[in-house]
Image: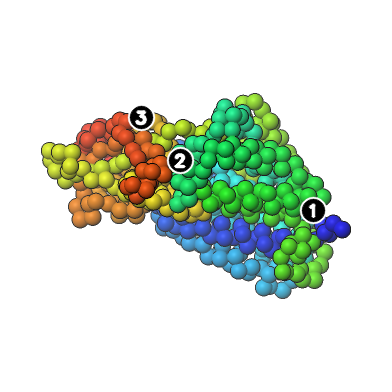
Amino acid sequence: MLPETGSYWLVRFVFQRGLALIYLLAFLVAATQFRPLAGEDGLLPIDEYVEGTTFRERPSLFYFFPSDRAIGLAAWSGVVLSAVALLAGPYWLPAPYAVPASMLLWLLLWGLYQSFVNAGRVFYGYGWESMLLETGFLAVFLGAGPSQPPVVVIWLLKWLVFRNMFGAGLIKIRGDACWRDLTCLDYHYETQPIPNPLSWFAHRLPDRFHRVETLGNHVVELAVPFLYFAPQPFAAVAGVATIGFQGWLMLTGNFAFLNALTIVQSVALFSDGVLTSLLPITAPATTATPGWLSAASILLAIVVAALSIQPTANMLSKTQVMNTSFDPLKLVNTYGAFGSVTTDRFQLVVEGTTASNPTEGDWQAYEFKGQPVRTDERPSQWAPYHLRLDWQLWFAAMRPQPGPRQRWFKSFLAALFENDAATLSLLESTPFPDEPPEQLRVIRYRYRFTTRDERAETGDWWRRERVGTYVMPVSAADLRTGGIGRRRRVF
């Protein structure tokens, strides 16, 4: 007998707790990183956002309140509201107030995070930011308390996770020949943005295993998503496959909250009947969905259907663009990841010295939290926490010299010359805790994981070779005369 599919109270409850946890992490990141990255004196100052756009194009509270005080208030308010959502705050209210309170709570979370995404610019230019906003907006209409959630919204969540997974599958099969010849995962674990403690071991798995897992990747992203819309238990089987796939990615890499968010979305692929048959839980007695909420969910579905036209056309196009929004509020988006895989890992090592005429031995390296510098240091686990500076450093290292999208990089160097405490908080350590360096330089290396024999002999996780100089040795005066001026005047 098939599990019953008409009840989604438990599905909603589990989904909301998972989404609240991701919001909590995202706002903690904003509270600790947004100001040094994009605040008043950030690497990309907030006033540049205000001067360079309109509220209609990139709506944000910080358009009207571009200050560190407002940023801190919004971030910590988001943390508190996320904690309330995590603890199921609206469910503690009397039934008539639960649904309106839930809608208000999730709407506030969505609006606050929208402000950070739109004002954060390149530091918030990742597909999972718009994905969190789209998921969070649908959560507004799920309700709370003893009433059932609107089934329409559950199906909209299925449509979201379908675009998430199927879009990623299409961009891969179109984007890089290595996905078609099943060799991409020969390189991925080594060259991904931020490896984690298991990445070395995954990279050293046999080539035959990498072929099989690449084929499995295509099955999970290109075939399994069509089962999301099938009756139970087939949709749940697809959900288990998707969650297992995302769990493997979490075990072997640091992709911020992308995988965790996809797992939360996948909860919508189950029903209460399936959950109670798999887990030692039971659903409480429930009531019907309020009529006005059902009507609102139908209007929502109409809006989503209309806004899905462009994302769907993009997803099916031969010129598919991944991680793109088509409306200012990012209500319906297109997704995709790793349309191409780099075969070499390039790293930027920022070094400083207090010597006026330094020799090679006088240069000392800054340590980053996620990007490897020392070859003997094991990669760390950070996801689902998001190291935004480290991600941008990975992108920056792809070029032999700073490009237009690395306008923030000279500001970063200028901040190191000032021993700016906020900027240094984004790093693992500085070799100059008491006084700033006299000169800085940035060396570009090619890193690769050690072989099993090299690891056994040396204990190192990496081997590296110097491939160029990203920034020649400069002083603070050199940066100023080179066109920087104040930190906010970047190239």
| Alpha carbons under labels 2 and 1: distance apart | 37 Å
Q: Residue at x 45, y 52 (%)?
A: 197
The three-letter amino acid code for the residue at tag 1 is Pro
Q: Residue at x 64, y 41 (%)?
A: 216
- Badge number at residue 466: none
Q: Position of residue 48 (x, y in %)?
A: 41, 41
Figure check: 193 above or below 273: above
| Alpha carbons under labels 1 and 3: distance apart | 51 Å
Question: Which residue position holds label 3?
Answer: 400
| Alpha carbons under labels 2 and 3: distance apart | 19 Å
Is residue 334 visible from the viewing direction of this image? no
Q: Position of residue 450 (x, y in %)?
A: 39, 42
The three-letter amino acid code for the residue at tag 2 is Glu
Q: Secondary structure at mark 2?
A: helix
Q: Secondary structure at mark 1?
A: loop
Q: Position of residue 308 (x, y in %)?
A: 70, 38
**So how many labels did they put on this image?**
3
Q: Secondary structure at mark 3?
A: loop
